[in-house]
Amino acid sequence: TNIMVAVWFAIFSIPTFLFVHQKRHQGRSNENLIRDSLNQVKETFRNILQYKEMAKFLLARLFYNDGLITVFAFGGIYAAGTFGFSFKEVFMFGIVLNVMAGLGAFLLGFIDDMIGGKQTIQISNIGLIIACMIAVLAPNRDLFNMSLPLIGNMVITGRTMFWIAGILIGIFSGPNQSASRSLMARFIPKNKENEFFGFFAFSGKATAFMGPFLLGYLTQIFGSQRYGVAVVLIFLVIGTLLLRHVDETAGIDAASS
């Protein structure tokens, strides 16, 4: 799979290398460029702190986004290690998750326009929490060691529950990410789009190691991937609680003032 990812990046990077031209900076050393970049990040951080609702939103997003990153990074590993998914099944699981994420973002996008970005994110966070609970609690054998009728010939098994969890994660992760970007856009003052969206992307990556690190640590300590995956629930719950304190209207007013 790593080779496939490398080939994918190589192919789709070609248009950027060929057609995107960057203005040359004359007379500046690499040391100066690095120092200037770090100073710009510090300046952007200070500017963001002037917009309290945006700062609170970015803090909340730091947690629930880390939960999502961990799900995407270790969902396949959890499927294989706990439920015995084959490589083909993990591959199909990834495809289904991404397709459902696209459908969720498309079909539930209108909710953002109706009730606002904050509430859309909260709904998606709650859906993700429920989905992760199903994934953590799903047994690795038939429920109660027996097959129970659910719908027609469909039975409740650990694998069935995990597939349901995966579909729900896909459905709610799409609107979660799209609503986060749209809410950030509403909070950004005019002529600060590039600077603040750059920090938005940076903040989403700066702590991305936390979820995978804690997942691996708890898995090693308890000897079960379920305890590790429970970290995702913690991140999502913290992010959801922090987001409750964000005033969307005040944030939009501050950006337009």
Image (cartoon, rainbow, N blue to C red):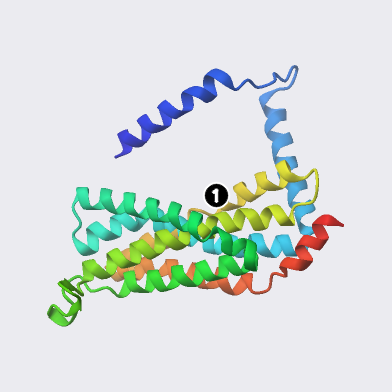
Q: Residues within 10 Å of mark 1 (few under 14, many from 20)?
A: some
In which quarter of the view is residue 191 placed?
Answer: top right
Dividing the image into 4 quarters, which one contains the C terminus? Answer: bottom right
Q: Position of residue 184 (x, y in %)?
A: 67, 55
Residue in view at x 57 percent, y 52 percent = 204
Task: Decide if residue 224 is in sight here.
Answer: no
Q: Nearer the viewer, residue 91 or 23?
A: 91
Q: Nearer the viewer, residue 174 or 197?
A: 174
Residue in view at x 29 percent, y 54 percent = 93
Q: Position of residue 88 (x, y in %)?
A: 20, 48
**The residue under label 1 is which amino acid type?**
Lys
Residue in view at x 63 percent, y 66 percent = 114
Residue located beneath label 1 in the image? 205
Q: Position of residue 143 (x, y in %)?
A: 19, 78
Q: In this figure, what is the number of numbered marks? A: 1
In which quarter of the view is residue 221 placed?
Answer: bottom left
